[in-house]
Image (cartoon, rainbow, N blue to C red):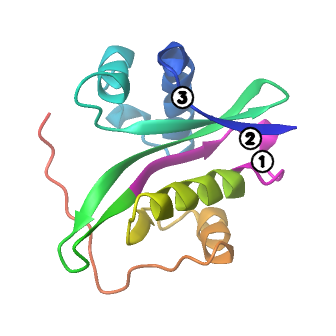
């Protein structure tokens, strides 16, 4: 039985563990320099800079989605950016990732967002195929730039 719920402050340690699991899967653990205290402050402090949904499978934490709002000047509307969508390996193939995305899309529509966006590593073919089945497409013609500030 799947249940989705908004993350609570008490969930931060478990979310932080899953962020590490995701970093391991993406082969990016060395880039994970954050800590649970900062995560807690950004999810539950003022201002709240991000939010998270937890997926529970028979009360066990099976995955999460962490997201925040962006803004499109072309649409003159907010967007919802999914920073992380993660389902633990033991729970994959049960529709949990899809239900997390459906919940985020619903939330975005309720808040008047004009788009739901996320990034995926170019080698992660299973995720790319999953997102295409969800009705998403790559944003051709755009290259993501980043400047590290830490």
* Residue 44 visible somewhere in the drawing: yes
Contact check, label 1 and label 2, Cβ < 8 Å: yes
Give the camera-side residue of 83 and 123: 83
Report x, y in % for residue 81.
Answer: 38, 56
Q: Residue at x 65, y 37 (%)?
A: 63
Please name the residue that numbered disc 1 is placed on: 92
Image quarter for residue 139?
Answer: bottom left
Left or right: 60 as drawn, with respect to 51:
right
Mark 2 neighbour class, 10 Å CA radius: few under 14, some 14 to 19, many 20 or more:
few
Q: Distance from label 1 to label 2 (Cα)?
A: 5 Å
Q: Residue at x 21, y 73 (%)?
A: 76
* Figure check: 110 above or below 47: below
Please name the residue that numbered disc 2 is placed on: 89
Q: Nearer the viewer, mark 3 or mark 1?
A: 3
Report x, y in % for residue 131.
Answer: 60, 69
Mark 1 neighbour class, 10 Å CA radius: few under 14, some 14 to 19, many 20 or more:
few
Q: Nearer the viewer, mark 3 or mark 2?
A: 3
Q: Residue at x 49, y 32 (%)?
A: 19
Give the camera-side residue of 143 and 107: 107
* Figure check: 146 above or below 59: below
Image quarter for residue 38?
Answer: top left
Please name the residue that numbered disc 3 is placed on: 7
Left or right: 138 as drawn, with respect to 92:
left
Q: Distance from label 3 to label 1 (Cα)?
A: 20 Å
Magenta-span inclusion, residue 85: yes
Say which element carries label 2: helix
* Residue 120 visible somewhere in the drawing: no
Q: Distance from label 3 to label 2 (Cα)?
A: 20 Å
Name the image quarter holding the N terminus. top right
Mark 3 neighbour class, 10 Å CA radius: few under 14, some 14 to 19, many 20 or more:
some
Report x, y in % for residue 114.
Answer: 38, 72
Give the residues in magenta: 81-96
């Amino acid at each position: 039985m799947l249940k989705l719920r908004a993350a609570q402050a008490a969930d931060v340690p478990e979310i932080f563990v899953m962020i590490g699991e995701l970093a391991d899967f993406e082969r990016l653990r060395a880039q994970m320099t954050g800590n649970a205290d900062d995560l807690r402050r950004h999810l539950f402090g003022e201002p709240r800079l991000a939010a998270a949904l937890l997926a529970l499978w028979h009360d066990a934490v099976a995955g999460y989605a962490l997201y925040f709002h962006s803004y499109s000047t072309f649409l003159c509307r907010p967007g919802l950016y999914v920073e992380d969508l993660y389902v633990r390996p033991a729970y994959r193939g049960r529709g949990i990732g899809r239900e997390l995305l459906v919940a985020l899309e619903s939330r975005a529509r309720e808040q008047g967002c004009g788009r739901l966006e996320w990034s995926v590593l170019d080698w992660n073919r299973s995720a790319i195929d999953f997102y295409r089945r969800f009705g998403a497409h790559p944003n051709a013609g755009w290259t993501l730039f980043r400047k590290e500030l830490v």
